[in-house]
Image (spheres, rainbow, N blue to C red):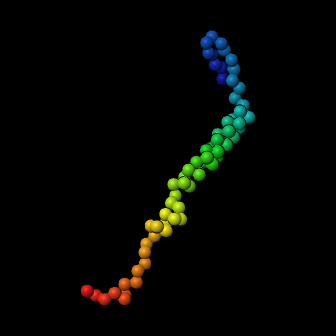
Amino acid sequence: MTHCVRQSESFFVAESPHRRQWLLATAGLGGVLTLAAIAPFVGSLLPSDRAKAAGAPVEVDIDKLAPS
């Protein structure tokens, strides 16, 4: 147990394995939910198919051109 004194008031904080489990579970769940919330924003930064097609390389057959 840890003894804490605050504003002339003392109390004990029990070090419980259940408390640590809840802390890890809520931290893990918060991380997963944060990633789930960020995923659509990251996906919106990727170019669309239309933008990819507009910037795609153009293939031209230059074998039929006469030298100048």
Question: Which of the image's four quarters has the N terminus?
Answer: top right
Q: How many marks?
A: 0
Q: Nearer the viewer, residue 21 or 64?
A: 64
**Is 21 displayed left or right of 63 in the figure?**
right
Residue 57 image-quadrant placement:
bottom left
- Vertical order, 19 against 31 (above or below): above
Looking at this rendering, what residue extends furthest in the left direction? 68
- Please state the horizontal and vertical placement of residue 17, each as a whole percent of the image: 72, 34
Which quadrant: the C terminus?
bottom left
- Residue nearest the observer in this picture, 45 or 30: 45
Q: 56 and 9: which one is in front?
A: 56
- Residue found 66% across the figure and 23% down from its top: 2
Q: Is residue 28 visible?
A: no
For image coordinates 65% across by 20% down, the residue present is 3
> Against 56, is 17 above or below?
above
For the question of whether residue 54 can be seen, the reply is yes
Q: Where does residue 41 sit, x and y in percent of width and height?
A: 56, 50
Image quadrant in which you'd find residue 58 = bottom left
Decide: is 66 above or below 24. Answer: below
Q: Name the residue at the right extreme.
A: 18
Horizontal placement of 59 versus 30: left or right?
A: left
Q: Residue at x 69, y 20 (%)?
A: 12
Where residue 21 sits in the image (x, y, percent)?
A: 71, 38
Seen in the picture, residue 14 relative to 46 is either above or below; the reply is above
Q: Residue at x 37, y 89 (%)?
A: 64
